[in-house]
Image (tube, rainbow, N blue to C red):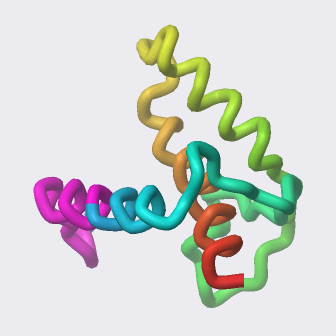
């Protein structure tokens, strides 16, 4: 196994996440609007291979990723690892709305 090229300290990740959530909450109502539901998705096997153009694009859906995350509130035993991928989908959509 190769040495990681980036190390993310968990305590700093938590601090950044809390800072960003506090910022969003400060200017938002109780819900965050996301106007675009579908997005292009690159399979993880090709996502980080920047020297080759992806050969397979799939379509993701913010509402599906959000529904999966909501399901984790009831039972997180099976999908916790992949939950980070779904969270990334939702956060990217919220971020695109914020800067868009």
Q: Can residue 40 be seen in this view?
A: yes
In the picture shown, does residue 92 fall above or below 70?
A: below
Q: Residue at x 62, y 75 (%)?
A: 98
Q: Nearer the viewer, residue 28 or 35?
A: 28
In the picture shown, does residue 10 fall above or below 67?
A: below
Residue range corresponding to the magenta coloring? 3-18
Q: Which residue is drawn at 60% across and 85% down?
A: 50
Q: Which residue is drawn at 72% across and 55% down?
A: 33
Q: Nearer the viewer, residue 48 or 91?
A: 91
Q: Can residue 3 be seen in this view?
A: no
In the picture shown, does residue 97 fall above or below 29?
A: below
Q: Nearer the viewer, residue 27 or 83?
A: 27
Label total for image: 0
Quadrant in which the N terminus appears: bottom left
Q: In this view, does 76 lie to the left or right of 47?
A: left
The spot of residue 97 in percent (x, y) is 70, 71
In the picture shown, does residue 71 fall above or below 75?
A: below
The spot of residue 40 in percent (x, y) is 83, 65
- The part of the image, by quadrant, that contains residue 20 is bottom left
């Amino acid at each position: 196994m190769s040495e990681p090229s980036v190390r993310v300290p968990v305590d700093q990740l938590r601090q950044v996440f809390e800072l960003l959530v506090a910022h969003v909450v400060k200017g938002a109502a109780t819900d965050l609007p996301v106007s675009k539901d579908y997005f292009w998705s690159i399979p993880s096997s090709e996502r980080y291979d920047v020297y080759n153009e992806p050969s397979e694009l799939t379509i993701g859906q913010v509402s599906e990723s959000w529904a999966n995350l909501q399901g984790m509130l009831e039972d997180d035993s099976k999908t916790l690892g992949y939950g980070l991928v779904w969270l990334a989908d939702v956060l990217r959509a919220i971020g695109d709305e914020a800067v868009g």
